[in-house]
Image (cartoon, rainbow, N blue to C red):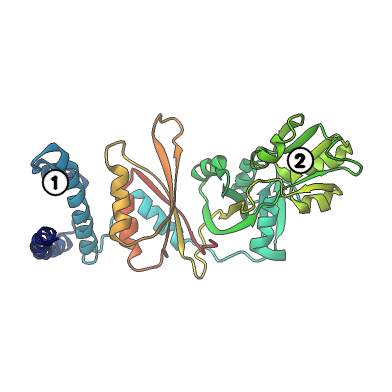
């Protein structure tokens, strides 16, 4: 133990030197910040930073240490930029930052008694999400496809859209993520709906009469253990769960059943043959409320962004460093392939914070400067 103590004492002595040198470096960083302020020079010089990091890595005694040295100095340089941004009030900005500021300036107040579009028909979980978020104050409009919902927003046929973005069992709703990148819209809220699938059929049906089961592909997937116990049933994917229930009710055929919500059974006069067909009792879908323009509602504490990155080593790490240095809590990171760009990805990232917080301006600017393309999707009240 005495030998270990000696090692620890040596580390403590080195750390004291490092702390002193770090503070000396920050004094020089502040001087550089004042110099940039006087001359209108931006804080981030990405090309210069790449050169510096390469030079620091070259100082390593062996190749295995080079990456660690680069990571250390990348963190130090991120802290340096944060200090300088407290001094330098930049007036320019990359496209993503400028677009965000323009959206904030044009933000609207919440719409009273709105028209709300969702994918599906009455009884869909999406309709339940509309009711959860807006209560009875909205006129809810069911449309056939997710893209129809976004088109309704674009054309002004709806004030809001409510769409599912992820499920606790089956993960991200990929089509919705893709549509979020295609349409210029903003997330203004979120809500969750607990999923409890039921097997339902016309009156007179039983488990023995059923030959075909209809539901959305996610409803079938989430009920796969139950369905696997009935291998003779033909599984038929539909556009949405409630639509499957409506179709089965219209046929009146006791060989057909649907997997959807209890509300759908009530609306379409179907009998529930089995409750809780989904194997995960904690199955929950997260929905986002989408607006054609940004809204900054009181208490907004979550920021949603989408960005792409330069196709080079360490680009994602540089983004993550910005969050670590600024003490931001990242709550979601999802990647999607970029159309037309093989092996390149868009990243959907959410973190806690308010766009109106004083420190957020510099953070947004740096994110915009670091990413190849950057867009703030919205700032809203967290429901999770």
Q: Quadrant of the N terminus?
A: bottom left
Residue 26, position as x, y percentages in the image: 13, 63
Calculate the distance from the C-alpha at mark 2 to the C-alpha at mark 1.
Answer: 60 Å
Front residue (pair 196, 317): 196
Q: Outermost residue, bottom direction?
A: 298
Q: Earlier in the sequence, mark 2 or mark 1?
A: 1
Residue at the image point whose x is 73% and y is 32% from the top = 236
Picture disc at residue 244 = 2
In this view, the residue farthest toward the right is 204
| Callout 1: SS | helix
Relative image position of residue 243 (x, y in whole percent): 75, 42
Residue 325 location (% of width, % of height): 28, 59
Q: Residues within 10 Å of mark 1 (few under 14, many from 20)?
A: some
User: How many numbered circles does the render carry?
Assistant: 2
Contact check, label 2 and label 1, Cβ < 8 Å: no
Q: Is residue 227 visible?
A: yes
Q: Please give the label number shown on residue 225.
A: none
Horizontal side of 341 relative to 55 (left or right) equals: right
Query: How busy is the neighbourhood of tag 2: few (under 14 within 10 Å), some, or many (20 plus)?
Result: many
User: How far across and down, in percent of the image, does residue 119 sit?
Assistant: 67, 46
Tell whether 157 sits left or right of 89: right
- Give the SS element for disc 2: helix
Q: Nearer the viewer, mark 2 or mark 1?
A: 2
Residue 93 seen in render: no
Quarter of the view holding residue 145 = top right
Which residue is more in the foreground, 214 or 210?
A: 210
Q: What residue do we see at 14% from left, 65% from top?
A: 30
Which residue appears at 33% of the width and 56% of the height? 323
The front one of 208 and 169 is 208
- Which residue is disc 1 drawn over? 52
Residue at image x 85%, y 36%? 208
Q: Is residue 342 above or below residue 125?
A: above
């Amino acid at each position: 133990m005495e030998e270990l103590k000696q090692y620890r004492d040596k580390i403590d002595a080195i750390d004291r030197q490092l702390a002193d040198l770090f503070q000396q470096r920050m004094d020089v960083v502040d001087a550089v910040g004042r110099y940039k302020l006087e001359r209108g020079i931006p804080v981030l010089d990405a090309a210069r930073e790449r050169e510096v990091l390469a030079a620091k890595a070259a100082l390593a005694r062996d190749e295995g240490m080079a990456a660690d040295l680069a990571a250390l100095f990348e963190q130090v340089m991120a802290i340096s930029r944060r200090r300088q941004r407290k001094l330098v009030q930049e007036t320019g900005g990359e496209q993503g930052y400028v677009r965000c500021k323009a959206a904030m300036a044009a933000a609207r107040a919440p719409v009273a008694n709105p028209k709300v579009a969702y994918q599906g028909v009455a009884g869909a979980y999406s309709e339940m999400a509309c009711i959860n978020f807006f209560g009875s104050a909205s006129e809810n409009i069911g449309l056939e496809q997710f893209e129809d919902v976004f088109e309704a927003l674009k054309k002004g046929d709806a004030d809001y859209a409510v769409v599912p973005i992820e499920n606790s069992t089956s993960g991200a709703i990929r089509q919705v993520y893709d549509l979020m990148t295609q349409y210029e819209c903003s997330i203004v809220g979120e809500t969750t709906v607990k999923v409890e699938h039921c097997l339902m059929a016309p009156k007179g049906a039983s488990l023995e009469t059923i030959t075909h089961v209809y539901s959305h592909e996610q409803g079938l997937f989430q009920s796969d253990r139950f369905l696997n116990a009935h291998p003779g049933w033909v599984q038929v994917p539909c556009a949405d769960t409630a639509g499957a229930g409506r179709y089965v009710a219209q046929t009146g055929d006791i060989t057909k059943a649907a997997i959807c919500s209890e509300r759908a059974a009530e609306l379409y006069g179907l009998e529930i043959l089995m409750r809780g067909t989904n194997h995960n009792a904690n199955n929950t879908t997260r929905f986002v409320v989408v607006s054609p323009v940004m809204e900054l509602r009181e208490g907004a504490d979550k920021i949603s962004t989408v960005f792409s990155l330069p196709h080079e080593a360490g680009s994602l790490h540089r983004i993550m460093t910005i969050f670590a240095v600024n003490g931001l809590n990242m709550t979601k990171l999802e990647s999607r392939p970029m159309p037309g760009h093989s092996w390149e990805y868009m990243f959907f990232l959410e973190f806690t914070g308010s766009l109106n917080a004083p420190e957020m301006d510099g953070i947004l600017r740096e994110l915009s400067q670091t990413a190849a393309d950057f867009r703030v999707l919205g700032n809203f009240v967290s429901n999770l």
